[in-house]
Amino acid sequence: MSHSSSHSINLHDRIAARLAPQLPAGSKLLLGLSGGMDSVVLLHVLDSLAPKLGFKLSAMHVHHGISPNADAWALFCSELCARYAIPLEIKRVDIAPLKDAHGIEASARKLRHAAFASSGIPYVALAQHADDQAETLMLQLLRGAGLRGVSAMPFVREQGRQILLRPLLEHSRLELLDYAQQHALDWIEDESNADDSYPRNFLRHRIFPVLEERFPAWRETLGRSAQHFAEAAGVLDEVAQVDGADEPLLAVAMLEALSPPRARNLLRHHLHLQGAPMPQEAQLEDMLRQFCGARDNADVCVNFGEWQVRRYRGLIYVMRALPQYEATLCLSWDGAASLYWPPLQRELQFTLTVGLGISREKLSQGQVTLRLRSGGEALRPHALAARRSMKNLLQEHGVPPWLRERLPLLYCGEALVCVVGVAVAAEFQAGEAEQSVMVM
C-alpha cells in the first residue's frame, strides 16, 4: 500500500471513529464550506461517511464580500455541491459594521457563526486542522492572552443550540493536501492567504517554516500545550464557581476575602458568565482597586468598551452601557401584553390576572401613559402607609442610583398609579377578587 493511500484510509477511518459517537443516527450535519482546500477535503470525507454513519449532510457558504473574487467562490461552491448532490445555502453577510471594532478576521468569524446558528441545523462541521490550532495558540500567546485565550479549540463544543465539530483537528495541512491531490480535488485559493501583513499568514509563511527545520513536531507540541492550557482554564473555572462566580450579583466582600490572583479569576469568570467581553489586564486591575478600595456606600462605575461594571451597596452589577434617553418621553399603553421602554432597553410585560397589582377598573378611568420622573412625585405604597417621596421609596427598595431616573412611572390621567417593579399606589391596588394587571 502506498504512503498516500494509507494516509487516505487513515484520514477516513480516524474521522469516522471520531464522529460516530457524536452523531446519533438520522442527525443533520451542516458543513461550513469556504471552498478552500481544508473544507473541500472535509466535504469529500463527509460525503463518503454520510451513508455509513447515517447522517444527512448539507453545506453553507458564507459570502463575506471582502474579496473581489467572493462571487466566484460562491459559484465554485454551488457547482461543487451540485456535483455531490449536497444541498448548499449561500449566506451573504456585511462585515462593514463590525470590522473597525473587531478587525476583519474576528468579525468574519462572528458573522460565520451567526450564519450557522441561523440555519437551525443542530450539528455544524468546521474544517480547522492541526496547523490552525498551532497558529491560533501562537497568535494568542503573542497578544498576551490569558488561559482561556490560549486554550485549544476543542473537537466538540456547544455553542448556543448547536454542537460544533472539528473533525480535522488532529490532521496537518500537509496531510490534507496529500489527500486532496490523491483524490484529484479542486479548490480555490483565497488571495489574502499570501498576504504577510495578516499576522496569521506571517506566522504561516515566515515563522513556522523556520521552526520546522529545528522542531519538526511543532504542530503536535503546540497542540498539546493548548490542551494543557484548556485543562488549566477548566480548573480555574471550577475554582471561580467555588468562590461564587455563579451568583447573579457578585458581593465585593467575596473579592476582598481572596488573594489578588484568585479575586482576578473570580471577577474575570463572573464577567464571562454575564456575557461581557474580557477587559484588558489594566482595566481588570482598575475594577478590583475601585471596588475593593471604595467606601461602603460609594457608587463606583468602570466603563470598558460598550459595557460597564458598577458597585452599589456592596454588590457588583455588570451591564451594557445604558443609552441616552429623552427626559420628556411619554408612551401610551393601549392594553398590549408588552411595551418597549427605551431608557432601560427592555420590554415591559403587562400580565392580566386577578387580585394582584393594579385594578383594571380604576385604570380604565383615564388615559394610561408611561413617563419618567420629573421631580416632586410621591406615592402611598399601601393603605396604612404615609406618602413616600420618590427618593425615599426608591432608596427603601434598593433601586440602584443609575436606574432611578430611568424607571417607568405609570399614570392614569395625571394620577401616579405605580413605579414599575417597585410599588403600586394604595388607591389603585386591586381588591382580592378583582380583575387586575401586573406590570413588570
Image (cartoon, rainbow, N blue to C red):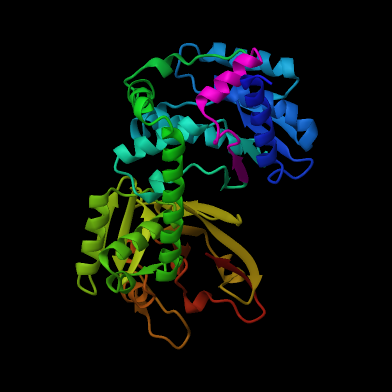
For image coordinates 38% across by 55% down, the residue present is 319
For residue 124, which quarter of the picture? top right
Q: Please provide percent x and percent y for residue 105.
A: 41, 29
Q: Please provide percent x and percent y for residue 65.
A: 48, 19
Residue 251 or 149: which is nearer the viewer? 149
Q: Please provide percent x and percent y for residue 201.
A: 38, 23
**Quarter containing the N terminus:** top right
Q: Does residue 180 show up magenta in the picture?
A: yes
For image coordinates 58% across by 33% down, the residue present is 168
Q: Does residue 373 show up magenta in the picture?
A: no
Indicate whether 361 appears above or below 23: below
Q: Which residues are magenta?
A: 162-184
> In this rendering, does residue 302 appear at all?
yes
Indicate whether 400 appears above or below 88: below
**In the drawing, does residue 354 fall left or right of residue 211?**
right
Residue 41 or 301: which is nearer the viewer? 41
For image coordinates 68% across by 45% down, the residue present is 22
